[in-house]
Image (spheres, helix red, strand yellow):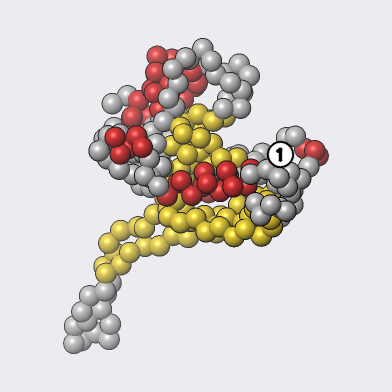
Amino acid sequence: MAKSSGAGKSLVHATLAIHEPPAGDSTSPGALIETFTFQFNPAQLTLSRRAEWKEGHAASTRNAAIPEFMSPVAREMSVEIFLDSSDEPSGNKVLKQVDLLLKCCVVTSKSLADDRPSPPWVVFQWGSFSTARFTAYVGSVDVSYTLFGTSGIPIRATCQLQLHELPQATEGQNPTSGALTAQRVHRVVAGDSLQSLAWQEYGDASAWRAIAEANGIDDPARLPTGTDLLLPATGEVHR
């Protein structure tokens, strides 16, 4: 896996936005907890999807039963994350990053307090690579420490994440039909404001409050460049 170099400051790094689970019956993730930025972009992504069929009993006149389609099964994605802090052999950067990933399988304090215990929801994104961008939960995190500092602290690790897509609106649904539309993550650039984003996304500048609430923003005037914002589904904003 090649390390990013100065060749390009324009290199887009994959991210995993970690959110509180939604409140109520919403299908949009809750407030942003933290964004995990990949130190090295994945060398490979493995995507899978299945359809569920039910096998019936064959009549005596047939040599096999005709299966009955039940439902599509959400996508799954396996992604490998490589972590390295060998340039700082006495630091604990790798341990902190691994801990953040492991917490994706642990119930959040807020959801526990709301009596709806759930681990975080996550949104994987890699630039405009929409093929593999979806809202998911982390099914498993497998960590292999492969290099240690002189004090025994891990300074290199490989993490294997298994992501399971969470149901969203069916592709092709009309956003005005009342059904939810899939949300996306927007990275703030210079000149962005909550009002301008609300106008671009929903055609309604007053919908900025929904963006602020989804991302736990208390001061809408402070919108640091580079921040990843979850833009709620249209159905969530206008219901």
Identify the secondary structure beneath mark 1: loop
The residue nearer to you, when weighing 237 against 15, is 15
Query: Residue at the spot x=40%, y=27% of the render?
Result: 214
Query: Which amino acid is tagged 1?
Result: Leu
- Name the quadrant of the C terminus: top left
Q: Quadrant of residue 15?
A: top right
- Residue lying at the far left in this picture: please name it: 60
Picture coordinates of residue 179, whole percent (x, y) = 31, 36
- Name the quadrant of the N terminus: bottom right
Query: Residue at the spot x=76%, y=45% of the render?
Result: 87
Picture coordinates of residue 123, whole percent (x, y) = 48, 41
In the rendered structure, the answer to whether residue 111 lies left or right of residue 227 reads: left
- Residue lying at the far top in this picture: please name it: 221
Picture coordinates of residue 102, whole percent (x, y) = 48, 49
The residue nearer to you, when weighing 176 against 223, is 223
Does the rendering let one see residue 133? Answer: no
Tell me the residue that label 1 is attached to. 11
